[in-house]
Image: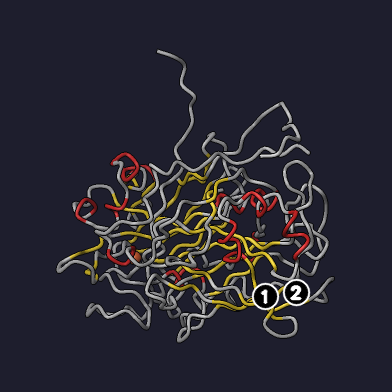
Amino acid sequence: MVQSLNLLKESPSQTAGPYVHIGCTPNFSGIDIYGGDLGTTMKTGPVQGTEITLRGAVFDGTGTPLRDAMVEIWQADANGIYPGNDPRGAADPHFTGWGRSPGDMETGEFTFQTVKPGQVPWRNGQLQAPHITFWIVARGINLGLQTRMYFADEVEANAADPILSRIEHQNRVPTLLAQPDGTGVYRFDIRLQGDAETIFFDI
Amino acid sequence: MTQNGYFARDTQWHPPALTPGYKTSVARSPTRAKLSFPTSLSEETGPVFGHNILGPLDNDLIHNFAAADQSAIGPRIVVYGRVLDETGRPVPGALVEVWQANAGGRYRHKKESYLASLDPNFGGCGRVITDENGCYEFRTIQPGPYPWPNGPNDWRPAHIHFSVFGQGFAQRLITQMYFEGDPMIWLCPIVGTIDDPRAVESLVAALDMTRTIPMDARAYKFDIVLRGRRQTFFENRAEGL
Ligand SMILES: [Fe+2]
C-alpha cells in the first residue's frame, strides 16, 4: 500500500440536452425571469479597440445546422487582457469578455457583438495570434466541445502562433479561421464532422 | 511566466463523443483526434459573476415562476452541496445554473411534445452562486421521469441539469444530477454514455434526512467536482510545449 493522493474525480459530463436554453437563456425560451439572459451583452459601455460582429452556425455530419445548440465565447479585451481574474491587471471596464448565444431558432445562427481581442502571451511569454475561445454544447454532444477562433486576416500573427504553427495537418488550420464577411463582420462556422471538421481542443 | 495549468481531463471517465445508444450523438460527434495542449491564460481565466446579479427567488424554483401566494406542484426538496476542484479545494463564486422538468416530467419549452401537463406555477430554471466555502443550495420540486424519442421506449430518470462555471474557462462543465434509489438510472441511454459505473454513481445525489426541513421539504446532497489546478513550486521553463 502507498499513501493516497486524495484526489477527487471530476464530475463526468452529461449532454446539455434539448432544453439547455431553459436553464441558460430562459428569456430566449419565453420564461420571463432574472431581468434578462446572461451573456447577451459583452459591451456595457464605450469600449476600447475595434468593434466587430461574429456570426456563424454549428453543422452536424449531414450538413444540417444545429438549432438547439448553445455557444459561449471567452476572449481578451482589445489590449489582450482578460476581464475578471487576469493576474496581469484590469481589463477594459466596459467589456465582459464572455458571450453566450442560443442561436437563432430557425437558422441556428449565433451572433456576438464584441471587440477584436488583443494578443495574449502563451505559457513561455511568446505572443499568440488574436483568438477567441469557443465552447459548444447541444443535444447529442456528450462533453462540451472547445475550440478556438482565429482571424483569417491576421496572416503574420497566425503564421507565428505557437499553436497554429504546430498543428500536424496544416490543411485543417483553415477550420479555425474566421473569414471577413463585410466591414467589421467575421463569419466562423463550426463543423462537427466531415471533410472540413473543425479542429477541437483537448485543453 | 509562471502559470499552473489545469489537470488534463480523464477521457475514460467522461462519456466519449460517439455513443450510438444515444442516437443524436451519431451525427454530432467529431471523428478526428482532438488537439491536445496545456492550458494557458486563455483557459485559466474565466468570467466572474457577482452575487449582485441574483434575485431573492433565483434559487427557489418552487416560487420563482409562481403567481403570488401560489407554488409549484410536486414533492418539495432542497438540493445542496459544494463545488470543489479535484484537489478537494472549494470553488467559491461559482455560478450554478439548473433546469428541469416539472413533477409530471414536462418541460416548459416550445419543442416539448410530452402529453403530461404544464404546471402554471413552475418555470423550471434557477441559479445560485457558491459562497466562500464553495457551498450552494436551492429549493425545487422533484422532477418526474419522461419518455423521449430515441429507442422505441426510452425514458429519462428523474434528473436536474447543471451548468457550472469554475474560476477558469477550462473548468466549464454541464452535467446532470440523478436521485438515489431510482431504478430508471441504469436503463437510460444518456446515463449509459458513461462507461464507468463509479462515474455514474458520482452523479447520483444522496437523500439526506439530516438536512430535511421538517413538514416542508426533503433534502438531497449533490457535490460537483471541477478540474483541479496544478500546484507547483517550480516554474515552467521556456522550452515551449
Ligand atoms: Fe432533461
Name the residue beneath numbered marker 2.
Answer: A44
Q: Quadrant of the N terminus of chain B?
A: top right
Q: Is residue A86 left or right of residue B177?
A: right
Label 2 CB less than 8 angstroms from ligand 1: no
**Coordinates of residue A103 in the picture (x, y in percent):** 52, 78
Residue farthest toward the top in the current orientation of the protein: A1
**Coordinates of residue A26 in the picture (x, y in percent):** 49, 75
Q: How many marks?
A: 2
| Chain of residue at mark 2 | A
Report which quarter residue B169 is drawn in: bottom right
For badge 1, the amino acid type reads Thr
- Toward the viewer: B151 or A8? B151
**Residue drawn where x is 83% and y is 71% of the image:** A49
Q: Quadrant of the C terminus of chain B?
A: top right
Crowdedness of circle 2 by 10 Å Cα count: few (<14), some, many (20+)? few
Does residue A155 lie above or below A6 as drawn?
below
Q: Is residue B218 left or right of residue A71?
A: left
**Coordinates of residue A199 in the picture (x, y in percent):** 53, 59
Crowdedness of circle 1 by 10 Å Cα count: few (<14), some, many (20+)? some
Name the residue beneath numbered marker 1.
Answer: A41
Report which quarter residue B196 is drawn in: top left
**Residue drawn where x is 38% and y is 67% of the image:** A139
**Coordinates of residue A56 in the picture (x, y in percent):** 57, 77
Q: Is residue A66 left or right of residue B2?
A: left
Does residue A5 lie above or below A194 as drawn?
above
Callouts 1 and 2 close, C-beta under 8 Å: yes
Say which element carries label 1. loop
